Amino acid sequence: MSADTKGHGDPHNLGHDAVPISEQGPAPKRIVVSYGFWIFLLSDFILFSGFFAAYAVLSGETAGGPAGRDLFELPLVAAETVLLLLSSFACGMAGIAMMARNVRWFQIAMAVTAVLGAGFLALELYEFAHLIGEGAGPGRSAFLSAFFALVGCHGLHVALGLVWLTTMMAQVWAKGFREDIERRMLCFALFWHALDIIWVAIFTMVYLLGSGA
């Protein structure tokens, strides 16, 4: 029986002439990059888990200073949350524009994402400056050290995400929707949405629970 005859009788390529996975060479780059990026995201979640754990342990260690209920302004934090969630929606729209190969709407959606993300960051910096101005800086107590470390780490991620975002806009503008650029854009979208998830946890654990304690 010829190889062609075997192929027709074995449409799922499960015959003895199939090449084992271990001998098929390296996986396509899109799989390798996706796998590596998921590992990066998981490591980032582990990093934040450490900060969350430290905050949970130290949230009551105010050293006689102000606690969360004395400092947090929920309307301000709610505005930050809305800005970040809307930026994630705009990022999703950018992904749809990329799939439609529409450069103009992609750039518009990414610009909106950048503006909303920058607005979130500006409010966070205002909050930090306001707390420090009131004498509630990170050196005041263990609680505030843990607060600034956790929220500041998230803010640093948003700032780096904005740099990444503008880089993606420039690459699409100069080179269009190439396969490698689309792969980087998908990684960026995952990163940006992950920041949303982490922020929702911060909003709940730090601000809502802290204000009610």
Image (tube, grey):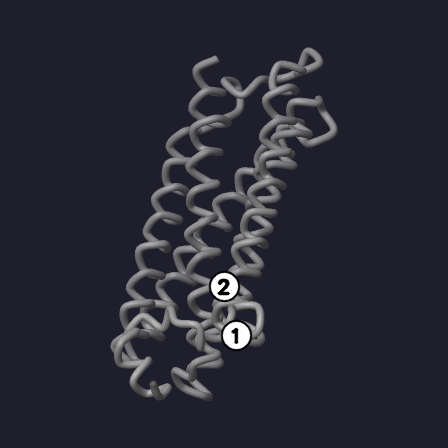
Q: How far across and how far down the image is residue 208, in percent?
A: 42, 24
Position above or below: 45 against 186: above
Which residue shows up at 69% across the image and 31% down it?
Answer: 138
Residue toward you, 42 or 200: 42
Residue on which the image places disc 1: 29
Q: Quadrant of residue 1?
A: bottom left
Would you call the spot at circle 2 few (<14 residues within 10 Å), some (14-19), or many (20 or more)?
Answer: some
Residue toward you, 26 or 170: 26
Indicate the amino acid at tag 1. Lys
Secondary structure of residue under mark 2: helix
Residue on which the image places disc 2: 34
Q: How far across and how far down the image is residue 211, in percent?
A: 46, 19
Q: In which quarter of the image is residue 81?
A: top left
Sequence-earlier tag: 2 or 1: 1
Which residue shows up at 71% across the image and 14% down it?
Answer: 63
Position above or below: 106 against 130: below
Q: How far across and how far down the image is residue 7, in percent?
A: 32, 81
Indicate the amino acid at tag 2. Ser
Q: Are marks 2 and 1 in contact (CB under 8 Å)?
A: no
Residue lying furthest right = 139
* Label at residue 51: none
Query: For this view, does 161 lie left or right of residue 93?
Result: right
Residue toward you, 140 or 145: 145
Which residue shows up at 51% across the image and 70% down it?
Answer: 20
Label count reads 2
Query: For this view, does 142 lie left or right of residue 12?
Result: right
CA separation in Å, label 2 and label 1 = 8 Å
